[in-house]
Amino acid sequence: MNAYGLTDTGRMRAQNEDSIFFSCEPVGSLPNALIVSDGMGGHRAGEVASRMAIKFFCDFVRTQKSAPGELLDFLVSAVDYANEKIYGMSLREPSLYGMGATFSVCAVSGAKLYIAHIGDSRVYLSAGGHLSQLTNDHSFVNELVRAGQLTEAAARSHPRKNELTRALGVEAEGHIDGRVCEADGGILLLCSDGLTNMLTDEKIYSIVEGTGTLEMKARCLIAAANDNGGHDNISAILADLRR
């Protein structure tokens, strides 16, 4: 596996509240790690939330041991730990009160992909001729889509599309999603909603499966999102699982 990631402020925001982390080498008890976190909160609190969430996650996996065959539980426990720490910070520091973040992390072991996720950043796998979303958006509009009350097309322009139903650090209990799926080949994409709100899945797929290195494709994704308005911070990590 090889990977490359970028984060960009976009064209409308004064600061970047997204944070990313990627390593194809072991990170503590993990064989590798790819993380996108999109922060939210008051003045600079979102940037603090996303950056510190990744730090706390990495602290956990570097100091705790994962039992064989329990990689998913370990991944979820690490995100739960980050949730607990961010929640505690928001209670102790008035300037950070109410801060939170999305958090999507992947680890690849053998032909298996392990995912822990909360919020509306996304994990995609491009394989077999199509792009599959592997995570479920924890958002108000996605709940309407799942209930059949709103189409996916209408959800893209809904006035409450940025309203989250779950986020890391806003409650004592994280309610983290965990998933294991096959990852024998393909290209993995982790991204914040600054990318997916600006580009359709079809456009993302055409770039991911286009020519060029992972770095070129990541830069192309960021540029395309900015060309379409760049309304938010934009982050993308690409990992080639065929190598």
Image (cartoon, rainbow, N blue to C red):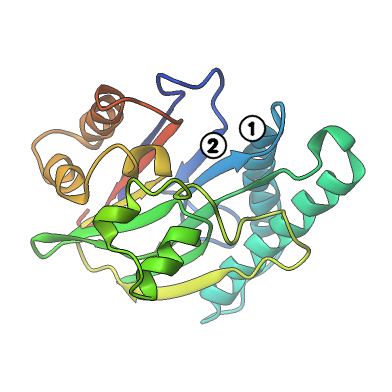
Q: Residue 13's spot in the image, x, y percent?
A: 50, 22
Callout 1: helix, strand or loop?
helix
Task: Give the left or right position of residue 243, taking residue 137 as reference.
Answer: left
For badge 1, the amino acid type reads Glu
Foreground: 31 or 214?
214
Foreground: 160 or 34?
160
Can you identify the residue that label 1 sits on? 47
Does 26 appear above or below 217?
below
Q: Is residue 6 visible?
A: yes
Q: Residue 227's spot in the image, x, y percent?
A: 25, 23
Q: Which mark is residue 19?
A: 2
Crowdedness of circle 2 by 10 Å Cα count: few (<14), some, many (20+)? many
The residue at 63%/61% (across/down) is: 79
Q: Residue 145's spot in the image, x, y percent?
A: 36, 67
Task: Give the left or right position of residue 2, taking residue 80 as reference.
Answer: left
For badge 2, the amino acid type reads Ser
Looking at the rendering, which quadrant does residue 176 occupy? Answer: bottom right
Q: Residue 214's spot in the image, x, y percent?
A: 24, 37
Distance from Cα at disc 1 to Cα at disc 2:
8 Å
Crowdedness of circle 1 by 10 Å Cα count: few (<14), some, many (20+)? many
Looking at the rendering, which quadrant does residue 142 occupy? Answer: bottom left
